[in-house]
Amino acid sequence: MLPKRHRLTRSQDFTRARRFGRSSGSTLIALYLLPVRSSDIRIGFSVSKKIGKATIRNRVKRRMREAVRCHLPKLKPGQDLVFIARPAAAQASYGDLAEAIAHLLRRRGALVERMERAPNA
């Protein structure tokens, strides 16, 4: 479970991220990223009924949350992220979802670049 301060909960925040945010997609997941003025990182997940019944939707959401939670320390501050599951996510393994999420975060530039090591003098 994501800490409460990192959750996107209001419907209007989801709508704003989808309308004004930049998007990237894969066969499993779509990502909308919206830069915001605050230094908070807020993340929301959307899994529609097209994915399957409640147990399938909940499983997909749990897997997506865990995959994003692993990247939380590496995310740039000041952005709202909305992950939307696509129908193929219902049959995907956790590894496939985690790989798709990591790829989308890198493609959208949501991760902090690694600091270069100073040359030894």
Image (cartoon, rainbow, N blue to C red):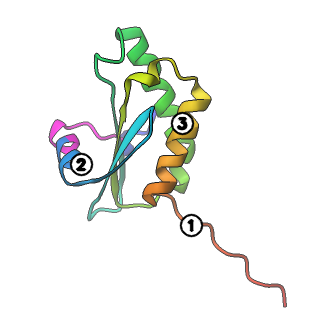
Q: Is residue 68 above or below residue 49?
A: below
What's the CA distance linking mark 1 and mark 3?
Answer: 19 Å
The front one of 73 and 60 is: 60
Q: Is residue 94 above or below residue 100?
A: above
What's the CA distance linking mark 3 and mark 2?
Answer: 20 Å
For this orientation, the residue located farthest to the front is 27
Q: Is 12 contained in the magenta span? A: yes
**Residue at left offset 22%, top offset 41%:** 14
**Residue at left offset 18%, top offset 49%:** 19
Residue at the spot of label 2:
17
Chain-order first, disc 2 or disc 1: 2
The front one of 78 and 19 is: 19
Residue at the spot of label 1:
113
Label 3 crowd (10 A; few <14 / some 14-19 / many >=20): some
Q: Position of residue 15 (x, y in %)?
A: 17, 42
What's the CA distance linking mark 2 and mark 1?
Answer: 23 Å
Magenta-highlighted residues: 7-14
The front one of 24 and 39 is: 24
Label 1 crowd (10 A; few <14 / some 14-19 / many >=20): few
Q: Are marks 1 and 3 in contact (CB under 8 Å)?
A: no
Residue at the spot of label 3:
67
Q: Secondary structure at mark 3?
A: helix
Q: Position of residue 5 (x, y in %)?
A: 36, 45
Q: Amino acid at mark 1?
A: Glu
Q: Position of residue 10 (x, y in %)?
A: 20, 38
Q: Which image quadrant: the C terminus?
A: bottom right
Q: Amino acid at mark 2?
A: Ala
- Position of 17 with respect to 80 (left or right) is left
Q: Are marks 2 and 1 in contact (CB under 8 Å)?
A: no
